[in-house]
Image (cartoon, coloured by chain):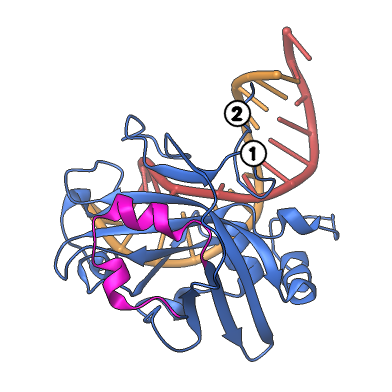
Chain colours: A blue, B orange, C red
DNA sequence: CGTTCGATGCACT
DNA sequence: GTGCATCGAACGT
């Protein structure tokens, strides 16, 4: 079942929690790829210094202010497309960055796309559990680009689905890779999952 | 184990 | 001109 717009029109932290275990599906001319979301980060409102809406509305961050259930895709560091799910009510800037997936369908296509990534210098082989590990890697593997910006996640080529999986146990910690707003524990992930980015929490 | 750095493009000031 | 919600290799300790 494809998650309806109402799923996203809720408090962003609730949505982030509930996205863990759901499945991101992309249908392209090259084939279908999908993966279970195992890591996601919330960016909430103009008061969140790490949210793109922190400095107010601009051309780039306009999708954040759009209706819940659409995709916000932007280019970072000149080579990485980042995909977010827009949340909260229309006009309320908030979104969830999808940071990692456990690959499910279309692994050969993912391998092919990853091998073409400009930041993979010589190394042709990517282990399966690393295909969608990290926000830049997963968009590359899934074939998600700026062309998907503003697309609805509730129908069409790019959707998020409930495929009946039991929601994994979710842990919260600090968001990764940002210079401000690291005090907020708004990164949800499946503890110990091999496809989660960053350094594993050592025990 | 840790830190540094190049690749690469565009919105923003 | 500056600074990224990154990736992965190349170093240093």
Residue A19 in magenta? yes
Q: Which residue is mark 2?
A: A201
The residue drawn where x is 20% and y is 51% is A45
Foreground residue, A61 or A85? A85
Foreground residue, B5 or A165? A165
Q: Residues within 10 Å of mark 2 (few under 14, many from 20)?
A: few
Where does the C terminus of chain A fall, quadrant-wise?
A: top right
Q: CA distance from mark 1 to mark 2?
A: 8 Å
- Residue B10: quadrant of the picture: bottom left
State the SS at label 1: loop
Q: Residues within 10 Å of mark 1 (few under 14, many from 20)?
A: few
State the SS at label 2: loop
Residue A114 at x, y = what percent?
72, 65
A180 shown above or below A109: above
Q: Chain of mark 2?
A: A
Q: Which residue is mark 1?
A: A192
Residue A167 in magenta? no
Among the two numbered marks 1 and 2 on one chain, the one whose residue lies closer to the N terminus: 1
A190 shown above or below A62: above
A116 shown above or below A41: below
A193 shown above or below A4: above
Image position of A7 (left or right of B4): left
Q: Are labels 1 and 2 on one chain?
A: yes
The residue drawn where x is 41% and y is 87% is A155
Q: Are marks 1 and 2 in contact (CB under 8 Å)?
A: yes
Region in magenta:
A2-22
């Amino acid at each position: 079942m494809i998650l309806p717009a109402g799923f996203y029109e809720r408090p962003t932290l609730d949505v982030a929690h509930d996205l863990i275990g759901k499945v991101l599906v992309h249908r392209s001319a090259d084939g279908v790829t999908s993966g279970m979301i195992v890591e996601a980060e919330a960016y909430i409102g103009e008061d969140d210094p790490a949210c793109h809406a922190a400095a107010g509305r601009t051309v780039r961050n306009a999708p954040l202010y759009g209706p819940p259930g659409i995709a916000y895709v932007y280019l970072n560091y000149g080579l990485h497309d980042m995909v977010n799910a827009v949340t909260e009510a229309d006009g309320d800037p908030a979104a969830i960055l999808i940071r990692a997936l456990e690959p499910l369908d279309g692994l050969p296509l993912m391998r092919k796309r990853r091998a073409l990534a400009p930041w993979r210098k010589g190394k042709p082989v990517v282990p399966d559990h690393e295909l969608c590990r990290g926000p830049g890697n997963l968009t590359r593997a899934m074939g998600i680009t700026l062309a998907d910006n503003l697309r609805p996640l509730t129908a069409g080529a790019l959707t998020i689905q409930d495929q009946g999986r039991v929601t994994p146990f979710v842990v919260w910690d600090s968001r990764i890779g940002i210079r401000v707003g690291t005090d907020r524990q708004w990164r949800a992930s499946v503890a110990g999952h091999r496809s989660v980015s960053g350094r594993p929490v050592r025990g």
